[in-house]
Amino acid sequence: MKVKDKVVVVTGASSGIGRATALAFAAEGASVVLAARREGVLKEVAEECEATGGRALVVPTDVTDEQAVRELARLAAERFGRIDVWVNCAAVTVFGPFSDVPLEDFRRVMDVNVMGYVHGARAALPYLRAQGAGVLVNVASIVGVVAQPYTHAYTMSKFAVRALGASLRQELALEGAKKIDVCTVMPATIDTPLFEHAANYTGRKPVAMPPVYTPQRVAKAIVKVVRSPRREVVVGPAGRAMVRQAKKAPGRTERAMATQVDRTHLSRRKRAADTHGNLHEPIPGPGAVTGGWHGGRKTAVRRIAVAATLAGAAVGARRLLTTR
């Protein structure tokens, strides 16, 4: 699919990967429909998109509200005549020991990250089916392949997103809808405000777990997968290495992930008070593409260190497998 002049709906467009994705499509000449909870921030994103040459429509939307998401699709089609691409990108997270996370926060993460994507798919697919073509992109995570401790709801949601994509692909194939694609994009750690906005009950400040990649890298992958659809795409070499290792030695990979999260995802020096983060209400202030985690600048050095760790794990895994 050519991107120029296409109509692209992006949820979670006020910050992070969603905002970077909207800007990337606008720069390619697409018309972008921006959805998130904060109207004022979306208007800023719209100005940025239009400055690059694209057209933009702002539709304040809480993706947990099914009717609001249906209205988002209706307004997009009404303004631009169709919907060619729908990117489900809105996401929230909570850190905490399993028994300490309030159930209301647990449910909210699942509601945004899973039901928000369900609402998006149910709103978009009737338009794609009517046209006989289009692309639905679901942004998941490598933790949808390799689980993490302390982010149970987020991890569960990303496994569910992968399952949703696989099930929809099968259903569309049985329908004979050959020109409708469902693609799942799985980033590694990305430099976004997600960690600052997270709910947290660990007593430790969440930080981006290295290596950290830029949101623009994910946005580029999303544009690429729309041009040439693939079932699943992992963004970031460290993420791809982790996914490969999970297939070869799942137990060892789980242990390695647990250790890395404890050592590098939750600060041992910075304490943090319990907070609901942005789960139930948006965080005040301007949105941003990045979270200040230096994605791109420190990634190269950290990538070498992670590669060495993974290589060591691979050697151990081979030895373990040969003794079985």
Image (cartoon, helix red, strand yellow):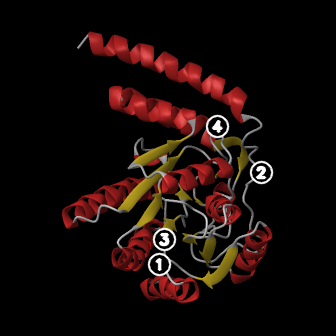
**Which residue appears farthest toward the left when viewing the image?**
174
The x, y position of residue 214, in whole percent, is: 68, 47
Residue linked to disc 2: 292
Q: Is residue 21 visible?
A: yes
CA distance for labels 3 and 1: 22 Å
Q: Earlier in the sequence, mark 4 or mark 3?
A: 3
Q: Which residue is located at x 58 percent, y 19 percent?
A: 308
Q: Amino acid at mark 2?
A: Gly
Identity of the amino acid at label 4?
Pro
Element on which disc 2 rests:
loop
Type of amino acid under label 3: Asp
Q: Which residue is mark 3?
A: 84
| Discs 4, 3 touching: Cβ within 8 Å | no
- Rendering coords of residue 39 (x, y %): 69, 82
Which image quadrant is residue 26 in?
bottom right
Specify which label sits upstream in the sequence, 2 or 1.
Answer: 1
**Disc sitting over residue 64 in the figure:** 1
Q: Tell me if mark 2 has few (under 14), some (14-19) or many (20+) residues whose alpha carbon lies within 10 angstroms of its own.
A: few
Mark 3 vs 2, N-terminal side: 3
Q: CA distance from mark 2 to mark 4?
A: 13 Å
Nearest the viewer among 295 and 235 is 235
Q: Mark 2–mark 1 contact, CB under 8 Å?
A: no
Bin the neighbour count of mark 1 within 10 Å (Cα to Cα): few under 14, some 14-19, many 20 and up.
many
**In the rendered image, which residue does mark 4 sit on?**
210
Q: CA distance from mark 2 to mark 1?
A: 28 Å
Asked whether residue 97 is in view, the answer is: no
Q: CA distance from mark 4 to mark 3?
A: 35 Å
> Toward the viewer: 89 or 309?
89
Mark 4 burial class by Cα count in 10 Å: few <14, some 14-19, many 20+ = many
First-in-chain label (3 vs 1): 1
Residue 228 placement (x, y as % from top left)? 47, 51
